[in-house]
Image (tube, grey):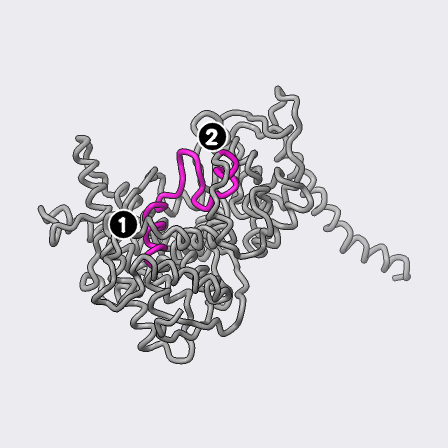
């Protein structure tokens, strides 16, 4: 065979598949954008739809923040993409997010990706306002910090430890599990199952062996089995132990009070959602708190000064009781939590679906397309904040114009469907910060952590930290 024939053969071998691939990508893009509403004169937002069927899901899962930052630089505050099996428009910026969140039930409705709906279930709790079990939270936090100081040694991996702490609190306060019910092995099994479920929440909707959805469902079934045992025990017991009613018990009573039959599957799904909203995101925020306070000792000292003024940094016999009234008075501590959530929101965005074709900033979002409003990007681009990369809790000490700040700072989402565990998380994070500041000093052994999203924000190195007892000197 001559040289020219070899070249031609090689070109056919490599060029033809490439051309077929490019043609398939182009046809996929045309197929996706064919869903635009032709009765609307506005164009679709800019952007790309990625690979056939897979869209840009793989790039986002693998690159996360890097991928999202690249998209923002290239396409601006509104762009189209294809994620988790659906054509999607990603939205950021206070004005754009305001339009989406205030359009609840009129323009958009909540719709998580198919994989999330399949794993967590179709049932959804709209709100949980649970701040009444403060004492139990304080007990768990204090016991955990004491154990860290007693057994940590030269290095403690903060993120897994905090996840276990928050899981125990959520299991006790939200679902009413007592430590003796699960035992150490049972608790570990539940933690591992929950982590496996969370890892696979955002995956392609393909339920085949070894796929992300398949692994997530297997883990979900382990959790549901344990929760069902707990629900049946509650149904068999007329009065809760010690008169204490957890959130699941209240949910069951509310359902029965409305004359509805208790649906076991819906209760299991609601309980799983309570755990998701009440521990995974709170663990992320608490880990970020430790990181920021470890890097900014001056801020930690200002927290301690506030605690001292409020009588919370005295000897145990003289300390004020840490009740809800005192917690609400800790304004600077609250600002530290807000600044942590601004720079490191645990959940990067919220999901909606367009109920009808809507117009947004010169573009159309067709009926049936998914809409993701970005929390982290909205914080990054908010005009409300100056020196955005600086950790400065004082920025929240001065009240901002309510209308502009309302959608510039949205760590819990917003509108009618804000985070299911928002009130639970606010109280728990404040208690955690108070107990941490008056119990411990610490040093981050690897310096500022690299944060990753998967799907909750967490430190890649698990935040190795050395803890020592606080001397009491400010």
Q: Residue at x 81, y 58 (%)?
A: 10
Q: Is residue 405 magenta?
A: yes
Task: Name which quarter of the figure residue 24 lies in.
Answer: top right
Counting from the top left corner in percent of width and height, residue 414 is at 44, 38
Q: Which residue is drawn at 48% across and 48% down?
A: 396
Dot label at residue 63: none
Dot label at residue 102: 2
Q: Name the residue under label 1.
A: 324
Q: Secondary structure beneath disc 1? A: helix
| In the foreground, 455 or 18 | 455
What stretch of residues is rendered in magenta? 403-432
| In the foreground, 434 or 344 | 434
Residue lying farthest left?
238
Q: Which residue is drawn at 56% across and 46% down?
A: 385
Counting from the top left corner in percent of width and height, residue 150 is at 31, 77
| 278 lies above or below 465 | above
For the question of whether residue 359 can be seen, the reply is: yes
Q: Is residue 132 magenta?
A: no
Residue lying farthest top?
39
């Amino acid at each position: 065979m001559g040289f020219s024939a070899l070249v031609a053969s090689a070109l056919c071998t490599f060029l033809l598949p490439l051309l077929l691939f490019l043609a398939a990508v182009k046809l996929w893009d045309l197929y996706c954008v064919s869903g635009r509403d032709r009765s609307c004169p506005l164009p679709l937002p800019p952007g790309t739809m990625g690979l056939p069927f897979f869209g840009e899901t793989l790039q986002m899962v693998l690159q996360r923040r890097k991928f999202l930052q690249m998209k923002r630089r290239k396409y601006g505050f509104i762009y189209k993409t294809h994620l988790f099996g659906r054509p999607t428009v990603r939205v950021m910026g206070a004005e754009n997010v305001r339009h989406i969140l205030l359009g609840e039930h009129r323009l958009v409705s909540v719709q998580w990706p198919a994989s999330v709906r399949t794993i967590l279930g179709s049932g959804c709790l709209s709100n949980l306002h649970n701040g009444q079990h403060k004492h139990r939270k304080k007990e768990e936090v204090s016991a955990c910090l004491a154990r860290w100081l007693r057994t940590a040694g030269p290095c403690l991996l903060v993120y897994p430890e905090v996840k276990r702490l928050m899981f125990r609190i959520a299991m006790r306060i939200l679902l009413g599990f007592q430590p003796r019910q699960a035992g150490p092995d049972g608790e570990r099994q539940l933690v591992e199952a929950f982590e496996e479920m969370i890892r696979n929440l955002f995956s392609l909707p393909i339920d085949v062996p070894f796929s992300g959805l398949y692994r997530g469902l297997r883990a979900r079934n382990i959790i549901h089995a344990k929760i069902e045992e707990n629900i049946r025990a509650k149904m068999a017991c007329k009065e809760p132990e010690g008169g204490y009613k957890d959130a699941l018990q209240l949910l069951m009573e509310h359902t029965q009070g409305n004359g509805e039959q208790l649906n076991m599957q819906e209760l299991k799904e609601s309980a799983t959602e309570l755990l998701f909203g009440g521990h995974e995101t709170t663990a992320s925020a608490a880990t970020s708190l430790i990181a920021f306070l470890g890097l900014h000792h001056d801020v930690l000292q200002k927290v301690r000064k506030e605690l001292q003024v409020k009588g919370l940094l005295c000897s145990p016999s003289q300390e004020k009781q840490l009740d809800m009234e005192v917690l609400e008075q800790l304004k600077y501590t609250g600002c530290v939590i807000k600044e942590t959530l601004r720079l490191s929101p645990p959940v990067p965005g919220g999901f909606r679906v367009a109920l009808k074709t809507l117009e947004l900033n010169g573009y159309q979002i067709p009926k049936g397309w998914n809409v993701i409003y970005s929390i982290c990007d909205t914080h990054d681009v908010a005009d409300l904040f100056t020196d955005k990369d600086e950790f400065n809790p004082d920025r929240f000490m001065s009240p901002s114009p309510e209308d502009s700040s309302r959608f510039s700072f949205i760590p819990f989402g917003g509108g009618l469907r804000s985070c299911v565990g928002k009130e639970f998380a606010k109280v728990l994070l404040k208690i955690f910060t108070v107990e941490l500041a008056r119990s411990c000093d610490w040093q981050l052994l690897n310096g500022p952590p690299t944060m990753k999203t998967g799907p909750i924000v967490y430190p890649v190195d698990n935040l190795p930290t050395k803890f020592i007892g606080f001397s009491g000197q400010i």
